[in-house]
Image (cartoon, grey):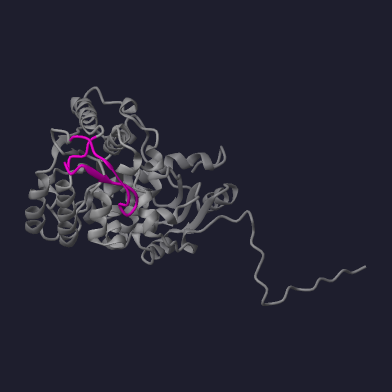
Amino acid sequence: MTVSSTPAPANRPPIADPAAPLSLCAREPHVPAERLVAEMVPPPRFDSVRFSTYIPDPNQPSQTEAVHVLESFAAGLGGAHAGGKGTVRRGFLGFGRAKAPKAPTGPRGVYLDGGYGVGKTHLLASLWHATPAEPALKAFGTFVELTNLVGALGFQQTVRTLSGHRLLCIDEFELDDPGDTVLVSTLLGKLVEAGVALAATSNTLPGKLGEGRFAAADFLREIQGLSAHFRALRIDGEDYRHRGLPEAPAPFSDEQVTKAAHATEGASLDDFPRLLDHLARVHPSRYGALTDGLKAVCLTGVRPVPDQSTALRLVVLADRLYDREVPVLASGLPFDRLFSEEMLKGGYRKKYFRAISRLTALARDAKRLVAPGEAP
């Protein structure tokens, strides 16, 4: 007996394969301003870090000194708002008030300067956790996230929202154009006047941030005034992600990456060049939401990024993936060949080296996604 089947109507949507991997290119998240504020806390990778879990390199005494200075700084912020106005604001828009204790004495800002991978973000997040104030009175975000917040709320509302905070932590303090220089310098000046303590990390000293960028004179003029708010702490050392660890793992084949993506629940699978094109259509403030719920990112056809704008967007995505501890499995070129020699010698070189360092760490994490015996 012959059994015939009737084809589905042409206008009926195909049935989704429940085992099919996700796609970053299919996501176009929209993030409300309220979420931007609520998420100004240390990222998941740094939820449990504390000063006690930071392991200083015994050959780098500056690391131990930084821990001691930051512990004292956090203790000095206990229960006090330096504005001396008797009240502090609470909540997203600053509604609700509470008595503020007497203002503390001592420096109102610390600046952690050092190369990529010496544990600056670990220390900054530890400071956030150690400061004895409720989470609503402490904010933690990257420089990019801070500028995105201003874009979402407007300058004056951002000042009102953050001016009642005890502490503002800014990770990876970067000044990429004169507009952001003026914006952040003015914002932090207002917050310092309101009594907010500041802490920041970067790969260069405050007075050196403008070197190698578009308008060094403009950068330096703005930053010199801003740097007066900080006590700079130099943290020497090598990238901890490379201490005693092998070099970046060799990429896998397209077939291995695709197979792992289908076998891993919550994994995404994208062609690398297509993903780079998609990032140009999604604002970097949404890259965190772009990675929501992902357990792994699988990429085929990794190749060098074509231009600096694309490279800087990839840096932001790498930061968000690293913050969320999302492993990255890839085929094509190894991650240390993403950026051209010209890029690695230019004004954004520290950003690119940081991205290489973080993607390399995530690539190591992703090796477990490939079945034993299938290593490249």
Q: Position of residue 230 (x, y in %)?
A: 14, 41
- Name the residue nearer the viewer: 282 or 270: 282
Q: Residue furthest bottom?
A: 10
The reply to whether residue 272 is visible in this rendering is: yes
Between 315 and 129, the one lying in front of the other is 129
Determine the residue positioned at 56% across, 38% down.
Answer: 373
Residue lying at 53% horizontally and 42% vertically, measured from the top left: 369
Tally of marks: 0
User: Where does residue 90 sit, x and y in percent of width and height?
Assistant: 31, 47
Q: Residue at x 28, y 54 (%)?
A: 144
Residue 294 in the figure: left or right of residue 339: right
The region drawn magenta spans 80-102
Q: Position of residue 115 (x, y in %)?
A: 22, 39
* Of residues 11 and 331, the one drawn nearer to the viewer in this rendering: 11
Above or below — where is 342 with respect to 42? Answer: below
Look at the magenta stretch and give its main secondary structure: loop
Q: Is residue 121 above or below residue 146?
A: above
When the figure is inspected, residue 204 is found, relative to residue 104, above or below; the finding is below
